[in-house]
Amino acid sequence: MKGPDRVLLAHGGGGHLTRRLVEELFLPAFQNPHLATLTDAAVLPEMPPGRPALSTDAFVVDPPIFSGGDLGCLSICGTVNDLAMSGARPLWLTWALILEEGADGDLLETCVRGAARAAEDAGVKVVAGDTKVVPRGKGDGLFAVTAGLGVVPPGRDVSDTHIETGDVILVSGPIGDHGATVLAHRHDLLAPGLRSDCAPLAGLVETLLDSGAAVRALHDPTRGGVVTVCHEVAGRSGAKVVLEEKALPVRREVTGVCDLLGLDPLALACEGRALAWVAADDADRAFNAMRSHPLGAESEIIGHMETAVAGAPPVVMKTRVGGERPLDLLSGLDLPRIC
Amino acid sequence: MCLAIPMVLVERNEFEGVAEIDGVQRRISVMYVPEAEVGDYVLVHAGFAIGQVDADEAAKTLELLREYSDSMVEL
Amino acid sequence: MSTSPFKDPAAMAAILDELRDEAEKLERRVTLMEVCGTHTHSVAGAGLRRLMPEKVRLISGPGCPVCVTPVDYLDRALALAVLPGNVICTFGDLMRVPSSSVSLEHARAEGARVEVVYSPRDALDMARANPDQQVIFLAVGFETTVPTIAGTLAEAEADGVPNFLILPGNKTMPQVMRVLVDDPDLDVDGFLLPGHVSVITGWQLFEFLIEDFDVSGVVAGFLPTDVAQGVLALVRQAVEGKAEIGNVYGRVVTAAGNTRARELVDRFFEPSDEVWRGFGTVPGSGLGLRPEFDHRNATLIEVTVPPPAEPVGCRCGDVLRGVIDPPECPLFDAGCDPDTAIGACMVSSEGTCAAWYRHERWAEGAGL
């Protein structure tokens, strides 16, 4: 697999250079018969039984290559995980790139490799793609847009509306790794032990669902972090989220980055973590199932649901020192502060 | 307005240094802590060490907190 | 899952028990004021306010440098930001503060070059890397931060970097604290003194509180047990009826502070009369660049600044002076909230109103 040294406008033009890009870079990377047909649309085999699930995402991460991943891997995992969180088995993905004229060829190749590896790890096929090139100055290196099709097997129904008072909340591993990695890079912090948690979670989700535990809902805390997901869940379920600060798994490097920049790990993105809402009686079964999977080896039970009280905060955290604090949603970006 | 955190000094020359907390390192100015040595803890604010952590005082505070903590256990 | 002793629940519970025992001995409720935004944040973040005994009222004063930055400063920063060739560098805290028109965040969206930096030295690096641009650093913050700006200026001078300037806006604490203690509407029994300002100034700076006003002060750090220990020390003083300057942050705060830092600040800055939002002009409370550094002073750049417009109904000033609690402002949660902030008290993540909105607002609704 070999890409160009540098991206030119012509690579998006549809002509000779585009063809070379597809044949020399994308096809060898993604290696599947559907993509190889190079037809206008991928005509797929019949769907397995169940309800189809469809998701789409756009990826604009800066920097595009970071410790533990790249835009390519991020884009594949992002869509795979969206499908998995809905209880779907991810099957086929599309991958469209918008490249900036002059973008480095190595950057492109790294991202393509990253995407290919992630697709293989996730057991999905990238069956359709597209490439456009915008003039220099009109793009930020590269952007990716994905869509993913999966199927929710019959009998499975994962949704916030099933959440009940007393349900427990589990997380599959330490929070904030991805967000902290990107921020550390941006603000010149060196943290060799820190890497993005970017990973495809479909396998972990299947292990959890196969355990027989009553899983009400699943979410991956990407943009906006755990706190954003909790607010969404509180809103849709009508119940109150109570987190336990002392139970939250946070890597020491993430704590370090947050302390330095004045940020909260609960607000940082994770790209390879699942939050699961499970019936209280099945807490142990779910916990053991998650822990049995390599991507859930550091799972923890981090909270539970209570009855909402009108006029009271929908999401709270019991602090380590015995207090309680409402967790508010972020306003705009979370910026490093001195105060 | 005082987001400053204690970090351990891992490298220094006269004006520049590298400090670390929880496995995260950053280059900092050490111009205001001429006596701080590698291995000492300094208080870092906006990329500058603004003071040194007094190890004896820190030990005293930690001892006090331990006593408080133990007093609860005894109840 | 850190096991920091400063966040140890057992130690915290023990300190709070002792605080409750001491507070029982008080004859009346005492009002303690913290004057450091980071203290506001710590109290809220650990959920401490609700753990305070009945007779201890903890209020927030003008400790948020963003909140007390006058609208005029932001207007000037914005006017500079839209001039071609300028790059404004700022701490993140200022990005969403409303000016007479829009915030720096909005200005950036409209094409102005605004960069958020962690350290003023990052701004100097940007100036070095972009010799054709004029980098202007927004110099806000209290005594803790000024030495980092002075240090960066010293570096700029030593390395001969001509295109690095600052827009002076730093403030100092003691003068405004005098105004607070003098205010007849305000009855403060003691101050939780800013821990990191004190690292630079030394706690001796605050002795005027006991000498001139017979009001207590205790320097405290920012971790939950630090704050609790500070409050406990203040309550003990109130019980004994003795005003003293105490220090429970001895691991970084000394009587004399950091002389070297103050000397360098003195080389570049001189006291100036500064406007504090909600207080008007507080003489000698600001730090202006000395005339020999005019070449570093962005205030001297000619720009057109609109006459400052304070938002109608906004009571930030009274909130900052500790005269009212945020819900008593007519705009609180009625047009002014963290997403659509009208006054700076709501914008800064630790402005009194923002902290209240995020953490305390619910207490009333839940009947706590």
Image (cartoon, rainbow, N blue to C red):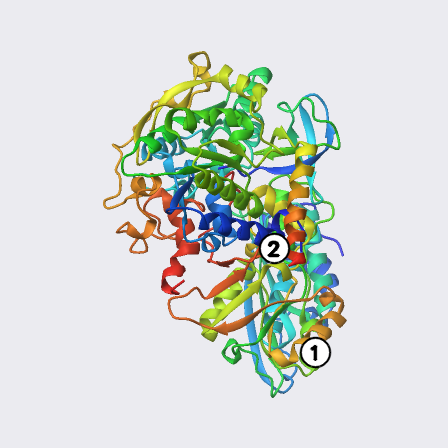
Residue C309 in percent (x, y) is at 25, 37
Tell me the SS state at disc 2. helix
Please give left or right for residue A255 compared with residue C271 in the image: right
Tell me the SS state at disc 1. helix
In the foreground, A142 or A309: A309
User: For the residue marked with disc 2, what is the amino acid?
Assistant: Pro
Q: Chain of mark 1?
A: A
Q: Quadrant of the C terminus of chain C?
A: bottom left
Q: Chain of mark 2?
A: C
Residue C63 in percent (x, y) is at 42, 37
Residue that carries the numbered disc 1 in the rendered image: A285
Numbered label attached to residue C9: 2
Residue C246, compared with residue A304, is above or below; it is above
User: For the residue marked with disc 1, what is the amino acid?
Assistant: Arg
Residues under numbered marks 1 and 2 in contact, where contact means CB atoms less than 8 Å apart: no
Please give left or right for residue A113 compared with residue C142 in the image: right
Q: Residue furthest left?
A: C312
